[in-house]
Amino acid sequence: MIEIKDLNKYFGDVHVLKDVNLSVAPGEKLVVIGPSGSGKSTLIRCIDYLEEPTSGTVTIDGTEVTKKNHLEMARKYSSMVFQQFNLYPNMTVLGNLTLAPIKLQKKSKEEATQIAMAALKRVGMAHKAGEYPQNLSGGQQQRVAIARALCTKQPIILFDEPTSALDPEMVQEVLDVMIELAQENITMICVTHEMGFARQVADRVVFMEDGRILETGTPEHFFENPENPRCREFLSKILH
């Protein structure tokens, strides 16, 4: 589904991604972990072309993503759930969810509303359809943001540390929604510090540091017998 080859990204003189190579199969659940500043978020932003790679290629379902076609590819294949919820404050929950299907996918208001209500139901937020984002808790806003990603019905959802901006007691309600989604045939790439989630949901875990992938493996391999010394050190600090 996704093929990343020799991906490099510079911000000015800072080399953020260094010759990254990664393949993601259709329906695979990939969790990317690593210390802050390791390039995790930049990697998934390059997949969605929110950041333009300096060199290398991102190919989705056999088509290379380029500056020219990236909007069309994003509409067709992928949606992103951000750290900050990025909901429009002047629109109701329902308005936030129907905007892209109506404007980008040219759906009728009736059809977009039907899709939006079904998505809200899936994340347990149908009763908040008429509310404005500022009246919701952080956890509720993030669940709405996940529902918004579902509304586009794309086969890939990218999660960029979706629980990092939440109060600790709200984290689980968002993870529960993501765990449920992981049962479906959606390709998921999730950047997260939630190791329990990685262990429960991931088909593969990728460990990054300093712009490189240092280790890839199943959760069992990764959490019980990682080979890379830096990976072992990282896990020892967060799994105490």
Image (spheres, rainbow, N blue to C red):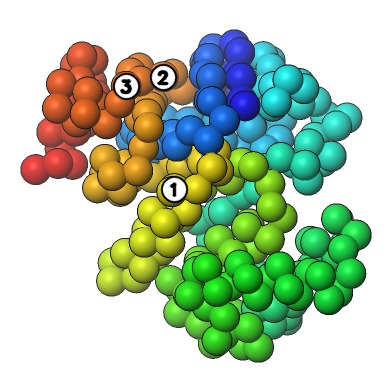
Tell which circle, 2 or 1, labels the residue nearer the N-terminal end: 1
Residue 95: give its label: none
Q: What residue is pinned by disc 3?
A: 217
Expressed as whole percent of the image width and height from the top left, the position of residue 135 reads 54, 87
Q: Looking at the image, is 70 positioned above or below residue 96?
A: above
Write the residue at 21% across / 29% down: 220
Q: CA distance from mark 1 to mark 3?
A: 18 Å
Residue 136 visible in the displayed image: yes
Front disc: 1 or 3: 1
Amino acid type, callout 3: Gly
Provide the residue designation for mark 2. Answer: 213
Q: CA distance from mark 2 to mark 1?
A: 23 Å
Residue 24 x %, y %: 53, 25
Disc 2 marks a residue whose amino acid type is Ile
- x 69%, y 52%: residue: 153
User: Circle 2 — which element?
Assistant: strand
**Disc 1 marks which amino acid?**
Ala
Image quarter for residue 85? bottom right
x and y percent of residue 181 in the render? Answer: 47, 53
Query: Where is residue 166 shown, x and y percent of the image?
Result: 39, 66
Q: Residue at x 76, y 75 (%)?
A: 113
Task: Judge from the rendering whether residue 195 lies leftward or rightward of residue 238; answer left or right.
Answer: right
First along the sequence among labels 1 and 3: 1
Tags 1 and 3 in contact by the CB under 8 Å rule?
Answer: no
Marks 3 and 2, Cα distance to the nearest angstrom? Answer: 11 Å
Front label number (3 vs 2): 3
In the rendered image, which residue does mark 1 sit on?
182
**Helix, strand, or loop for circle 3?**
strand
